[in-house]
Amino acid sequence: MYEILNAVYPYITGLYTLPWILVGFLLTIIIAQITSRKKIDTLMKKIGLILLYFFIPVLIFRIFLNTDFGAQQIEFALIVSIIVILMYLLAYTYARITVKKLDLKGPKKQLYLNTALTNQGRSSAFIGGALLTSTWSVEAAIYIALVGIGLFAVIPYILSYIHKKESHQQKKAENVKGLPWYLKLYPWYLISFVVAGIALHSFTGQNSLTLLGENTNTLLKFYTAITIPAALYYVGASIHPSDLKKTELKKLFGFEKAGENEDHWLWVRKMFFLASLLTPLLTLAFIGPIFFLGYIPNAWFAVIIINSILPITSTNMFLIPYGIDKKSTAHVVTWTTLICVPIVVALIMLLGIYIP
């Protein structure tokens, strides 16, 4: 059995994992002919939580179990923290400018601000997780852990504060239904696997994976390797075929008027532009000169650039109770996934060849 697992392992890692997005998309279309799409989406949410809790943390644990978390990794964590903060500041600034340009006022203004800010969160745990099986795995794991804190701890707190303040000012009795406890817990749960891996590695003072024994090590590697194709299948299954019409694409880029939905598509267009073009370009302008002057390692540059152009994460849908627009979020998640994933694949290939 262990020989079979070792033989299969190379084919569920690296770029071999990326076609699972297409598999998830096509297989879901076939299953939808038998059952309703609503039931599929409900099931996929549960599968997403299983991946978040029982697969991604274990993969991160395995990576850090065999990694020296020294000064260089700490420096990278600080740089990533700064970049993530700058990304959200960019989103907020861009949203403020857009609000003035579109002359949005009152609740509609705040709804756009909340939605634009939240949708700067990227799919690091899922699509970006493909990097966990690359030569930049440690840096990718650090990035995922820090983005997890931002997505499930910092942003919900900010949105909750804004929403409660608005409700008080408008003298409404409504309460914000907070994130479920399992999502509030998640960033700290994820960090605990990082800490456990580092602590065990420090305690043993050697290649910790060899202490598990050859067979246990094989099982752990195979189990954690399944994470990425499973996560990418989830991403593909989350794409709705109804969003892939040619008319929808024209509406996204403003080539066709959307009638009474024109305001909606304008919002989607603005957020799509921010996530897919403006943020990656400004990130490159910030980190590129530092890299080309030789001040940061290749892995840092690769992980930061790839994460800057990742699609918006579908887990933002969990934040709808905090006062973000559901329809705009769903569309911008779909279209950034469809357009950014091929770019991410190309970047992984090119950067892996030229700056390994």
Image (cartoon, rainbow, N blue to C red):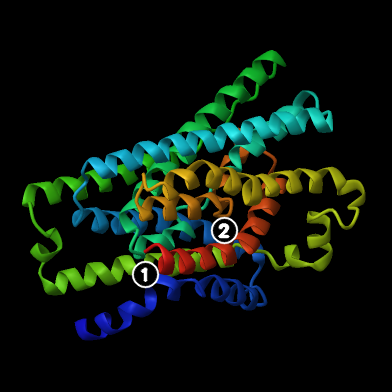
- In the picture provided, is 193 more to the left or to the right than 38? left
Badge 1: residue crowd in 10 Å (few <14, some 14–19, many ≥20): some
Q: Is residue 257 above or below residue 221?
A: above
Total labels: the figure holds: 2
- Read off the residue under disc 2: 42
Q: Position of residue 200 (x, y in %)?
A: 13, 49
Q: Nearer the viewer, residue 284 or 234?
A: 284
Residue annotated with mark 1: 226
State left or right for residue 338 relative to residue 292.
right
Q: Amino acid at mark 1?
A: Ile
Relative image position of residue 234 (x, y in whole percent): 52, 64
Instruction: Please tell me which of labels 2 and 1 falls first in the chain.
Output: 2
On the image, which quarter does residue 96 sit in? Answer: top right
What residue is rendered at 60% in x and 63% in y?
39
Residue at figure coordinates x 83%, y 56% from the top left: 251
Q: Amino acid at mark 2?
A: Thr
Q: Residues within 10 Å of mark 2 (few under 14, many from 20)?
A: few
The percent position of residue 160, horizontal first and vertical second, equals: 56, 27
Residue 292 spot, x, y in % from top left:
44, 50
